[in-house]
Amino acid sequence: MSLFDKFPAMERTDLRDLKKGIDSSFKEFSRSWGESIEAFFDPLFYFLVNFEKLLLATPWPIIIGIVAGLSYLGSRSWKLSAGAAISFLAIGYLGMWENTMSTVALISVATFICIAFGIPIGVAMSKSDRLQSFITPILDIMQTIPIFVYLLPVVMLLGIGKVPGLIAVCVYAMPPIVRLTNLGLRLVDKEILEAADAFGSNYRQRLFKVQLPLALPNIFAGVNQTIMMALAMVVIASMIGVKGLGVPVLQSIQNQYLALGMMNGLAIVALAIIFDRVSQKYGKRLQRHREGGNDV
Amino acid sequence: MKIKNLTGISIASAMTVLGSSAFADCGDITMADMNWPSATLMANVDKIILEAGYGCSIEMIVGATTTTFASMNEKGQPDVAAELWINAVREPLNAAMAEGRLHSAVNGPITDLGEGWWIPPFTAEKHPELKTVLDILDHPELFPDKEDPSKGAFIGCPAGWGCQLANINLFRAFEMEKKGWVLIDPGSQAGLDGSLIKANERGDNWFGYYWAPTSIIGKYGMKLVPFGVPFAGNENWDGCIAKAEQDCDDPKPSAWTVSEVHTVVTDRFINQAGVAMDYFAKRIIPGSVMGAMLVFMEEEQADGPDAAVEFMSLHEDLWMQWLPADVAAKVKASL
């Protein structure tokens, strides 16, 4: 009967030894491999450092010009481009310029990495059910595991700063683009694929000229979610020593500086909206082109 | 609405009366379960003793220093903060104590505690010439910053913590920027701990802010570095160093202020559970005992309640002295 009264849990001491064993083997691992892992990420680290320095060294009118220009190139909309310029002017006027540049540097690199790795993974997943059943639980872990669980190990391995911050951001922000690329490709009508085969298209033509264009709405929904989540992670990245808009937010949370928190929070929102609208408009233009029917 | 509340309260009080006839007046107490090990240990020890010995019914409220204090100050809840570090909240606390809303139950519930700037033991051994902070400041090249190796990295206090302002202003006071240092904001406790652990595990030099009693300091044998300058007075510290950067125009170099830690209780607690005030006044844990408990908590991965039970069974001779004989007997019986 006593078996049912209390869950037959592991002995307390065994459990403790297990936990201690895992901890000490991680420390052992970090001692023997930490330096080489750090060295592996060094190129990325120096790129991030120099990119941030470049953004900070560039005179602000040029940055605003580039932002407005890129917005226009992406969206072909004067309104959006003017809105982006005005947001950046407001950010600078309210004294958040340097933090915003640091955040832009980190987030643009993070988003780029997420998309550059996420789309190919999504494509591979859509081709193989076995791979899908393997990767899906990994994505679930990445999205749901509490961030604080892996912050400390990452810091113990890589130290505080940009690279661990980037990794934390990507762990959280990459799953949507992978999932939605996979979904979009799987939703492409089988008959269209048959037609493509019937016209004798090879694998490459089928993927790049039929499947990916038809999956674009889903893929761009994934890009949107990835950007939003990356920016939402700015504050978390600041918890491991990444400079940027997250630092004043952390400061304001603990000191009840309402205005400071609100201003920096809204600056993050402004960045998210600019990044997103430009990429979405760009995506729509890609699709309009396809709907015109002169490229497929 | 009002009637409903009243019946709720009367039912609750009826239940506590039934539950503990001897100290029915203690009733429901809320207690801060602060989010660092020594505080959660103290809070859980208090919980065991107040519940078993004084018949209180205790609810723990999780929080950090500033948030807990703000809540105590504005709402009178939680009733007890076992380990409140005063430096971060001195001015509003003094105001609240003058108005009689909050009271200090004991000054210094743990001995040998404090904040300051630390280096790992191997750094101290390898460079015996680094005797004070002033010596270290002349050698930024020993503590290179990863982002800009030409500068020395000083790991400050996480953004938003009370100590952040003091570290920023001392950084200015010692003219560390001119001497080739950068102030690194570790962002969180995970960031600060992680960087300290990483440096110790790899044998890298590390120079930064920390505080004792903590298991991490005990475990790695971190060395507290004397500042090499005297404490430059309360006016400089409270009126400048501890304030926001824009409110501190001319910070002077100074040793760290002596850390004052109190157990703080609300006025309501004194009215309701005044007998327990004698207990708090005597409840002083020696730094060495606390240090050992913290290493135990870390190594055994024990949480607050577990550690409190361990403390009660290990240090009976200590806590027996805090309590009148009849109360002590009751606590002992409950263990």
Image: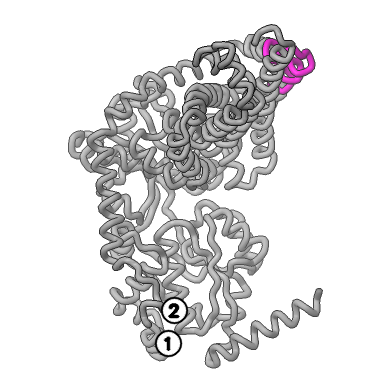
- Image: magenta residue range: A72-88
Which sits in the foreground, B106 or A69? A69
Q: Which residue is found at the position 34% from the left and 75% from the top? A: B312
Kindly identify which chain the residue marked by label 2 belongs to. Answer: B
Q: Which mark is residue B212?
A: none
Which sits in the foreground, A190 or A231? A190
Which sits in the foreground, A231 or A189? A189
Q: Which residue is found at the position 46% from the left and 21% from the top? A: A48
Q: Is residue A113 above or below residue A3?
A: above
Residue named by callout 2: B49
* Amino acid type of the residue tagged 2 in the rendering: Ile
Q: In this rendering, would B261 be left or right of B265? A: left
Query: Judging from the image, what secondary structure is the residue with disc 1 in?
Result: helix
Q: Position of residue A277 (x, y in %)?
A: 70, 23
Quadrant of the drawing holding the C terminus of chain A: top right
Q: Position of residue B171 (x, y in %)?
A: 44, 34
Residue named by callout 1: B327
Q: Is residue B322 above or below residue A201?
A: below
